[in-house]
Amino acid sequence: MLKLMSIPLNIDLLSVGLAVAASMILGFIVFFRDPRSITSAVFLVFVFVSSALGIVNYLSYQLTDSTVRLWLIRFVMFFSVFQSFLFFLFIIVFPKKSFIFPIQWKMPIVLVVGIVAVLTLSPYVFSGIRMGSPTGVSEPIPAPGIFVFAATTISLITAGITLLLRRMKRAQAQEKNQLRYLFAGTALMFTFLIGFNFIFPAFLGDTRFVPFNAAFTLPFIMFTFYAILKYRLLNIRVIATEILVLIIVGVTFFEIILARSIGQMLFRSFVFGLLLVFGILLIRSVRREVEQREKLEVLSLELAQANERLEELDKMKSEFISMAGHQLRAPLTVIKGYTSLIMEGTIDGASQKIKDTLGKVMFSTDQLVKLVSSLLDLSRIETGKIRYEFIEGDLAAVVEEVIDKFRPNAQKRGLSIVFENKAGDALNTFDRDKIREAAVNYLDNAIKYSASGTTIAVTLELRDGHIRLSIKDGGFGISQEDIPKLFGKFSRLNEARNIDPNGIGIGLYFVKRVVEDHGGKVGVYSEGAGKGSTFWFELPIKKE
């Protein structure tokens, strides 16, 4: 059987290779997810430069030829300048999609970076190689230009970190969380770089970790990768699936390379093909699922924002109604007062014709006062400013008081009111004024909409631990389709508008809110058009 040459694996090389591969994969994933974003573009370039730096740095410790090693070290410096610049640049643009660089500082910085980068390739930074160093590794001979290199890179890195800290302090919510991940990656990267590149060699004389710069940069790339994708509708599940598939396919590909025979190669190639196809299908499936979920999340967010806006508008409306009501009430009271004085003859000189006219003014003023009072009641309910004073009382007494108030008006319209108290002397706890107003709304509507010659039946009875007030009118009746609308805000039936065009549909809504705040219920039933309606509300009976 034909044998293939095996390739020995170096653990150091494998470590650097995996770090570079992982960095490149993450960089391409970010870029191809949003290629038009300046953040994605700068991130990919940073990954390229960091990977090149890591490879060149590793090779500089593996090759012994002095000339080759000198040039590799110079290229390490070369890429380090651009890495520092790209780090600073990335802090500026992250996490923006676009960014316009001010010309007044763009050109000077780019010019300085370019000059220093070229300088690193000259003898002005490293003039040569010193053989036989105490560490056992040939070391470069620094020249005066090394200080320019150090000042430039340190300045760029310091500026980047300073800017990052200032942005973290000012940022809000999502961006602040992104910058925290970025800071964590930055802290880890420079901790590793400073520790293994400077502290270990300077104090312990140990340079064995210096070749692994590619691995030291990887934490920054990973944290930044996560910060970019986590908050951009790019689900980590998709990313994890893609990485997993890439790793499996990559390992299988290396297995093909390391095959010891044609048979092994063919078999492993077949497995590689299967894994590649199923991997692509898996990625597509997960991506489709995530995209659908993200669309739902976007719609849900938009709906929540719309609801918040509606609530804000509703609050503004209630505040406006409250303010307008208070502003209108005072002048209306004055108008009503002076009109009453003239009509009653307190002020001399007014003819009967003027008094008749003023009577119409008085009627309109009364209607407007009622409207303003209704709006104020609505405003108090909507804003939660309505206050209740719960005391023990007899609901029957309140109902009789209301009936006595409306009986003269009912008689003028040819109506009779019959009250039947089936509840006896049952007591319960309620706000007397608010419940009286609720009963007033019911009875006023009954009188307003009942046909002349009919009887309004008012009943008080006990039902399942509640005391119920029912008012049956002789009105136009209500269809079953219209019943659910009655207790809504500003809701009025067409028949009601024809009889009383001045109403605004707040009365029944007020009754509902007040009764429900007492722990009670409201309702209405009707046998149909022309057969009248029975409106009722019930309150819980006080327990002994």
Image (tube, grey):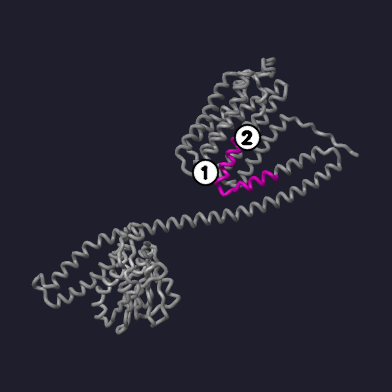
Name the residue nearer the viewer: 62 or 282: 282
For the N terminus, which image quadrant?
Answer: top right
Residue 473 in which image quadrant: bottom left
Left/right placement of residue 273 relative to residue 83 reads right
Q: Position of residue 87 (x, y in %)?
A: 56, 34
Q: Amino acid at mark 2?
A: Leu
Left/right placement of residue 275 relative to residue 292 reads right
Q: Position of residue 251 (x, y in %)?
A: 74, 40
Q: Secondary structure at mark 2?
A: helix
Reply above or below: 450 against 54: below
Q: Position of residue 164 (x, y in %)?
A: 50, 35
The circle on residue 96 is: 1
Residue 86, can we see it?
A: no
Kindly give the residue lying farthest to the left in the view shown: 348
Name the residue nearer the viewer: 466 or 293: 466
Reply above or below: 220 against 98: above
Q: Residue at x 62, y 35 (%)?
A: 218
Q: Residue at x 71, y 29 (%)?
A: 12
**Separation of marks 2 and 1 at Cα, in angstroms:** 22 Å
Name the residue nearer the viewer: 399 or 69: 399
Q: Which residues are magenta?
A: 219-245
The circle on residue 218 is: 2
Kindly give the residue lying farthest to the front in the view shown: 544
Crowdedness near tag 2: few (<14), some (14–19) or many (≥20) residues, C-alpha within 10 Å: many
Dot 2 or dot 1: first in sequence order is 1
Q: Secondary structure at mark 1?
A: loop
Reply above or below: 541 against 172: below
